[in-house]
Image (cartoon, rainbow, N blue to C red):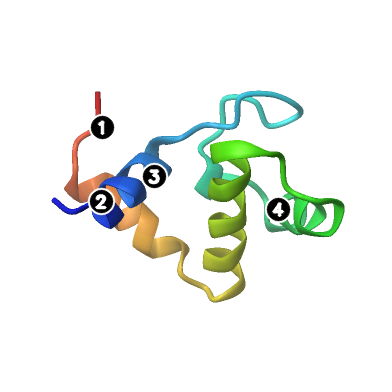
Amino acid sequence: MDDNQKKLVKLAYTKMPFGKYEGRFLIDLPEYYVVWYHNKGFPKGELGEQLQLIYELKLNGLEELIRNIKKRYPKPH
């Protein structure tokens, strides 16, 4: 598995660490919430990068890509 694949598998299993949607998988965040972050500014660091990618995936209707990764690959350690 290359680095991009690992990054997507990790993204598929990452949960929101705080706020109203704490504990929810990033891919399952409501679209309006991700758009709000896009307008407000994403957090710094890896979480911000992941939320930005989630925004792009939702914008382009590609959420199923991440959901299929969860079906195909086990949760990383």
Which callout, 2 or 4, points to the residue nearer the camera?
2
Q: Is residue 72 left or right of residue 13?
A: left
Identify the mark nearer the N-term, 4 or 3.
3
Residue at x-position 42% and y-position 44%: 11
Write the residue at 35% across / 40% down: 10
Residue on which the image places disc 2: 3
- Determine whether the residue tagged by mark 3 lies in a helix, strand or loop: helix
At horizontal 19% and vertical 36% (from top left) the residue drawn is 74
Please, what is the three-letter code of the amino acid marked with disc 4?
Answer: Val
Q: Of helix, strand and loop, which one carries label 4?
A: helix
Q: CA distance from mark 4 to mark 1?
A: 23 Å
Q: CA distance from mark 1 to mark 2?
A: 16 Å
Give the farthest residue toward the right: 40
Residue 12's disc is 3
Q: Label 3 amino acid?
A: Ala
* Mark 1 or mark 2, whichever is nearer to me: 2
In the displayed structure image, the side of residue 69 where residue 48 appears, left or right: right
- In x, y percent, where is residue 1? 13, 51
Numbered mark located on residue 34 in the image: 4
